Image (cartoon, grey):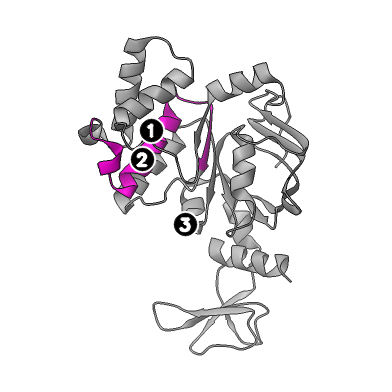
Amino acid sequence: MTTALSTAPVHLEAVTKSFGRARVVDEVSLSTGRGVIGLLGPNGAGKTTLLRMLATVLAPDAGSVRLLGLDPSDPAQRTEARRRLGYLPQAPALYPGFTPFDLVDYVAVLKEHTDRDWRRQETRRVLEAVGLTDVMHRRIRRLSGGMRQRVGLAAALVGDPDLLVLDEPATGLDPDQRLRLRSLLTAAPTVVMSTHDVSEVAALCQSVYVMFAGRIRFAGTPAELAALASGRVWEDDAQDPRAVRSWATPTGTYRHLGDPPAGAQVVAPTLDDGYLLLAREAHA
């Protein structure tokens, strides 16, 4: 998964970020291609801090960041990068007295879109894309949590960004809205999104990075992540104490991860299996 620096939408070299004595991102290097890239990992892995650096909200303590061929450490290039990216934070700060229309239009102003007619047309377009046309003039304080999440997403979509940086974008969305989100993201040039939901990675992502304790522990395709558990998954009618992880399935059998005993019914691995084994090894 190497991509030439000149063409990589996102390129990081030995990026490090600490808060006090805690090193939250620890010498992360990666280079993405286009498409939807998933960032998978548990709470506290450093995903949000890494995405904040990609969104130019934070600067790294060490290492280099390149976004769309631009260097955010240079003020002029940072401004240009911000024009060309959209960012959805994990908990978007929305002005409760604004309407969705007001807020998205305000974001367009911050991106230096000076044509008022264009902004009004673009604001309506992105709000329609996320299914908020009927409430675009309602105060944000009166909207549900899922609607507020979609307001934040609409703001990130203003101007058809070349790079979308999304922190848990499906939070609070119902199944129908998640399908709408998938359609939006697959149409974008490059998306880097964090998630706890392995099914979202399987459905959306061409590539995936798995992060534990501030470091990237896996980089590859979803199929390659699942293949980490090849030959190490078996099912039985009873729980097996020899497994490193086991759980009951909806059919009443038990699924086990680890080294299968002789005669075990080995089954095909899933993305969850590969992730769980990787997590076990990372914390061993």
Q: Which residue is mark 3?
A: 199
Q: Is residue 166 left or right of residue 233?
A: left
Q: Earlier in the sequence, mark 1 or mark 3?
A: 1
Q: Is residue 270 visible?
A: no
Q: Is residue 3 left or right of residue 86?
A: right
Residue at the spot x=31%, y=43% of the render? 147
Q: Which residue is mark 2?
A: 150
Q: Is residue 175 left or right of residue 239?
A: left
CA distance for labels 2 and 3: 20 Å
Could you classify mark 2 by the number of other residues whose Cα lies within 10 Å: few (under 14), some (14-19), or many (20 or more)?
many
Q: Earlier in the sequence, mark 2 or mark 3?
A: 2
Residue type at numbered disc 1: Ala
Residue type at numbered disc 3: Ser
Q: Is residue 262 magenta?
A: no
Query: Toward the viewer: 17 or 139?
Result: 139
Query: Toward the viewer: 254 or 81?
Result: 81
Query: Toward the viewer: 211 or 5?
Result: 211
Q: How many marks?
A: 3
Quadrant of the image occupied by residue 281: bottom right
- The numbered mark at residue 182 is none
Please provide the residue range marked out in magenta: 137-166
Q: Which residue is mark 1?
A: 154
